[in-house]
Image (spheres, rainbow, N blue to C red):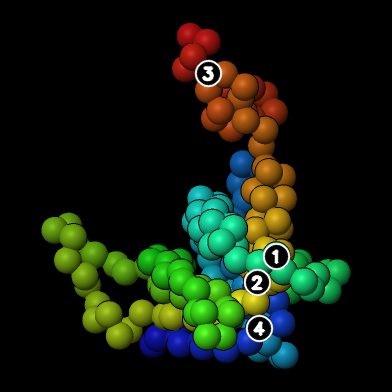
Amino acid sequence: MSVYYDFEEVDAFTVGAVGQPGARTFFLQARRGTVRVTVKCEKQQASAIADYLRRVLNDLPDPTEKPVPGAMELATPVDAVFVLGPVGLGYDRTTDRVLVQLEEVMEVDEEGEPLDDDEDRGHLRVFLTRSQAAAFCEHTDAVVSAGRPACRWCTQPMNPEGHACPRMN
């Protein structure tokens, strides 16, 4: 069964991680009133969305509002409705909103052909104000950087006990 959520406005659009650095699970979450939709994602997907939004915002006037404190934290319980696959991003000049469209990952067979019909995939579509998009970018940077520190020579994440650095070999 597929899920489809479409938010013309949201109270919050955020990212968060659950677990210890090195074993964290990342989630994107949209909230409007009592409706909450959570999507499991990869750290790199969240970071890529923030990078794109930042590029869009660079071409627009600075946001004038700030999000409500605490609005960027994941609401619990964190129950993902699907795992993130393709991401669509855009900007609607008529409404001055940034579009973020998230789709469920599509299962494929060994030849790369879809196993299910595209209509069965979950979708989440949200329109963000410039302020919400800017807050998402800042918060994503903070969440991503809260993980394991990067090695100064190879930039790969380091565990508390160290790591096998390919450049120091």
Q: Residue at x 56, y 61 (%)?
A: 59
The amino acid type found where label 4 is placed reads Val
Separation (CA) of disc 3 from disc 1: 41 Å
Which quadrant: the N terminus?
A: bottom left
- Does the residue at mark 1 contact the one at mark 2 (Cβ under 8 Å)? yes
The amino acid type found where label 2 is placed reads Arg
Of badges 3 and 4, the one in the foreground is 4
Q: Which mark is residue 165?
A: 3
Find disc 1 in the rendering and name its residue: 62
- Neighbor class of circle 3 (other Cα within 10 Å; few <14, some 14-19, many 20+) is some
Q: Is residue 97 left or right of residue 17?
A: left
Residue 61, given in percent of the width and then of the height, sits at 66, 67
Q: Is the residue 8 above or below the residue 27 in the image?
A: below
Residue 159, given in percent of the width and then of the height, sits at 64, 30
Q: Is the residue 106 above or below the residue 37 in the image?
A: above
Find disc 2 in the rendering and name its residue: 130
Of badges 1 and 2, the one in the foreground is 1
Residue 138, given in percent of the width and then of the height, sits at 70, 56
Separation (CA) of disc 1 from disc 2: 8 Å
Q: Say which element carries label 4.
A: loop
Q: Residue at x 24, y 64 (%)?
A: 108
State the residue in front, 46 or 104: 46
The amino acid type found where label 3 is placed reads Cys
- Neighbor class of circle 4 (other Cα within 10 Å; few <14, some 14-19, many 20+) is some
Taking the view exactly as shown, the residue that stands out farthest to the left is 111
- Neighbor class of circle 2 (other Cα within 10 Å; few <14, some 14-19, many 20+) is many
Find disc 4 in the rendering and name its residue: 10
Of badges 4 and 2, the one in the foreground is 2
Quarter of the rendering containing residue 11: bottom right
Q: Earlier in the sequence, mark 3 or mark 2?
A: 2
- Neighbor class of circle 1 (other Cα within 10 Å; few <14, some 14-19, many 20+) is few
State the residue in front, 29 or 100: 100
